[in-house]
Amino acid sequence: MNPKFEELMQHVEKMQALGAAMTLFGWDAETGAPADSMEMTSRIVGSLSSQYFEAMVNEEVRTLLMELKSAEDLDEIQAAIVRDMVKNLEDMEKIPPEEYREFSELQAKSTTVWTKAKQNNDFASFVPTLEQIIAYTKKFAGYSRKDGQSLYDSMLNDYEETFVQDVLDPFFAGLKEKIVPLLKQVVAKNDQIDKSPLQQSFDVDKQRELNHWLAEYVGFDFNRGILAESEHPFTTGLHNHDVRITSHYYEDAMESAIFSTIHEAGHAIYEMNVADDLTLTPVGGGASCGMHESQSRFMENMIGRSYEFWDPIYAKVQEMFPEQLGQVSLEHFHKMINKVEPGLIRTESDELTYCLHVLIRYEIEKEMIDGELAVEDLPSIWNEKYEAYLGVKPESDTMGVLQDIHWSQGSIGYFPSYALGNAFAAQIYHTMEQELDIQGALRNGQLPIITNWLKEKIHRHGMIKKSRQLLKEITGEDFNPQYYIDYLTDKFTEIYGL
Amino acid sequence: MNPKFEELMQHVEKMQALGAAMTLFGWDAETGAPADSMEMTSRIVGSLSSQYFEAMVNEEVRTLLMELKSAEDLDEIQAAIVRDMVKNLEDMEKIPPEEYREFSELQAKSTTVWTKAKQNNDFASFVPTLEQIIAYTKKFAGYSRKDGQSLYDSMLNDYEETFVQDVLDPFFAGLKEKIVPLLKQVVAKNDQIDKSPLQQSFDVDKQRELNHWLAEYVGFDFNRGILAESEHPFTTGLHNHDVRITSHYYEDAMESAIFSTIHEAGHAIYEMNVADDLTLTPVGGGASCGMHESQSRFMENMIGRSYEFWDPIYAKVQEMFPEQLGQVSLEHFHKMINKVEPGLIRTESDELTYCLHVLIRYEIEKEMIDGELAVEDLPSIWNEKYEAYLGVKPESDTMGVLQDIHWSQGSIGYFPSYALGNAFAAQIYHTMEQELDIQGALRNGQLPIITNWLKEKIHRHGMIKKSRQLLKEITGEDFNPQYYIDYLTDKFTEIYGL
């Protein structure tokens, strides 16, 4: 091994350990930490974060990276690690360490403030914190943007390389043009799907049991992962042998728990399948937010909301909930879980309206970052757009602008990757269909046929390849949103008999 | 503030954050981490541990400490921090960083190996790991011992300063001389206490509920702490606003869960009551292992096994378990929870035989460290001593030499502090009795009267004072084991009507 690279890996090991510690504190804050612990714990996390920064941005690492940048004896993984670190170093070196540290402390506190604001439907109490968060993210984007690049493009590029406004504007325009008319046709025929059986009360302990079973069924390995509970379902992980997901259980929202679990399991299976020689390195995660989201949405929607997926297992669900579902046919169940209902909550929205939720956030972020939109005006513009695009108006900010955790963590420019993930998933599904009998595998309960294909083509590569390149290699063409539009059109035309 | 001290605190902050991260990984390993995660996670913990070592043992810190050692403008807390750090630095500087790191990784793995060995009653599979652990602890004790000091005395002194073999030998001899005859008298009258009501089946969910309630009743603050579940109950904490305890629930062992919970709550209340300006500093913990144990045993036995403690709350327990306890009087319940039964398991032993369990471990450790006892011979000597002192013989190593986690973590010399803790508790109880109406407070459910006294006299001081000094200041005399012997004699003479 190149001795300089070996030396670099000693620094990497430190960074990875500090990063994993921050991840564990994050997990703990969402799933277990005592209510009054956060103020002191944020001092700990702030220090870890600043040590992470110091381990990454220092003269030794810089010198090693500059030498390794042009080294010719690195293998593919080593080269990817160096490339990734050079980019991060260059981005991070632009941020003064003190600001980085202040921001990390702010992030830790902000989540608590947002949680309380959401609980109390009190957006005003969140305004000062969110203003600070946005000020920092703008400042940081200003440090890293290229000449002439807008601040928002700089943020977007951080989450999904090359997918900036000149790609996203036509992507969202296309969706708006095709989906809005389709939605109207669908909603007009909505009376034909009676969803009341799913709106009954489902015992929470039984839901827990079912969700654990479903997670395992789709391929989540409980020897290498945990399923816990939190306000907002999420996936996190320390390495490919420790991947953690959450769901949430309410008596009157079984469907929400099921698809949250399958969604997060899709993320988790990606992380679990990353190759052993990549995990615990800087390229040990998923290729990008969008590619990650493609795997969760693939599992949730293309697999989890298909008729064939439920075919072999629906009897089990009926057995667990005989009162509620004993008399409901699989055909009826399949229609219920695909019913299109323009609603307020992104994470619980159906497949068809989902992209409109993302569109709204995209438009708001554009205005907030590159335009003049003030934080205090967010609730009103949020509510207006919901009324305009989805025909629904939030009655509270809890159900509106406060619903997502992202902005509280400074994740601005992240939302578009949710829509891109769906489009990636549709494009990947199109290719997989030509190579595998997907429906047959599902009918026989052979989920590994599907997950192994994904592992081979996508998961095991970690971040060795960028999402756009990976997509091209898997599907043989550049990003093409038409597959997504076709997929939605075909699926809902069939379900609604249009 | 002394500017050098201010500079020192920047290093302290890093160390504290790394220490807290290791604590959280430790908590996670016992309460949540997936089964197959440990191998990779131990690499993370190993790196954090080595970063902790580097943050503590380096030229900058050394220079600052040497200057601050003789500074005259430090307040009491600052002086204690410097004193504590100088001692740790001097101890740690003697350990080569590579060995420290190897040992930390070994510790992380060892717990898993021990857990499996215990599950499978397979001591042989634990031998190579334990041999390695012992080799490291002996090597480290060799680095830090003073001239002429034995290795075991060096280990003992690490856990409980000045309480080495010349104090412990007469202490244990005194217990042996007085307790063994008392035990014989008691066991001869054991038929008069029928314990069958407590040996029934108790619903685990109800036990959980009762234990949460009891923890809160004795003063555990759930806004600043968590009660979870693990194989072996323990207490850990990130700071005084995040203190975590575990218990364990089995249908047929409600008594064990109750007193584990009260015991760990005693530890936790100590940590929660440490002053805000001490927590997250090197002197933010309890004064010593023994002083910590005095607080848990005080709560478990002197409080938790007293008649007066249960007087106001026993009706609640009866209500929760009407079938099992509805017809059992408080007098009977009180005798049951104090019944003396020589058994195999230290953590579930009664108050009277407890010190004999510790005595056995003390004698074995002496032989293992300063003598010639080989690891492979541990089971046979363990079993012989149990037969000789307690009249019971383990049928399996799971119930014998594998029962405690301590050796697997390299905690050798720790056990004696358990017996010392009891003796400290008795000495402290004697003083408290003269200042407070303890029985009255318990009968009125006024636990805070007791915990506030402990907070004022002991808890809030953290590690500012060494245990021996603290004991002297609270009780007005040096360590005096006679209080413990008198306490046990009086209590069991009364309960058994001797």
Image (cartoon, coloured by chain):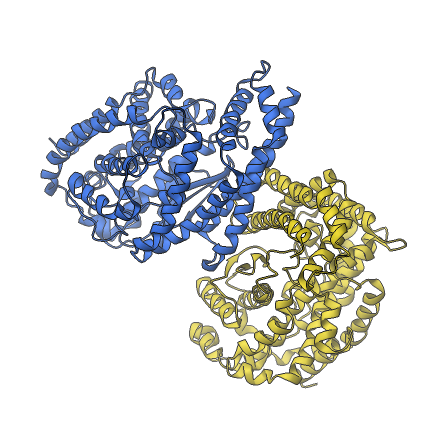
Chain colours: A yellow, B blue
Q: Residue at x 73, y 38 (%)?
A: A98
Question: Which image quadrant: the N terminus of chain A?
Answer: bottom right
Residue positioned most to the right? A148
- The quadrant holding residue A247 is bottom right
The spot of residue A81 in percent (x, y) is: 69, 57
Above or below B175: residue A184: below
The spot of residue B408 in percent (x, y) is: 38, 46
Horizontally, is B483 left or right of B283 in the view? left
- The quadrant holding residue B368 is top left
Number of on-image labels: 0
Horizontally, is A113 left or right of B241 in the view? right
Above or below A12: residue B164: above
**Residue toward you, B300 or B388:** B388
Horizontally, is B171 left or right of B248 in the view? left
Above or below B266: residue A259: below
The spot of residue A318 in percent (x, y) is: 46, 76
**Residue toward you, A479 or B107:** B107
Q: Residue at x 65, y 83 (%)?
A: A433
Asked if residue B210 shows in the view, the reply is yes
The spot of residue A235 in percent (x, y) is: 59, 59
Horizontally, is B253 left or right of B414 in the view? left
Asked if residue A495 shows in the view, the reply is no
Question: Which image quadrant: the C terminus of chain A?
Answer: bottom right
**Residue toward you, B4 or A344:** B4
Residue positioned most to the top? B72
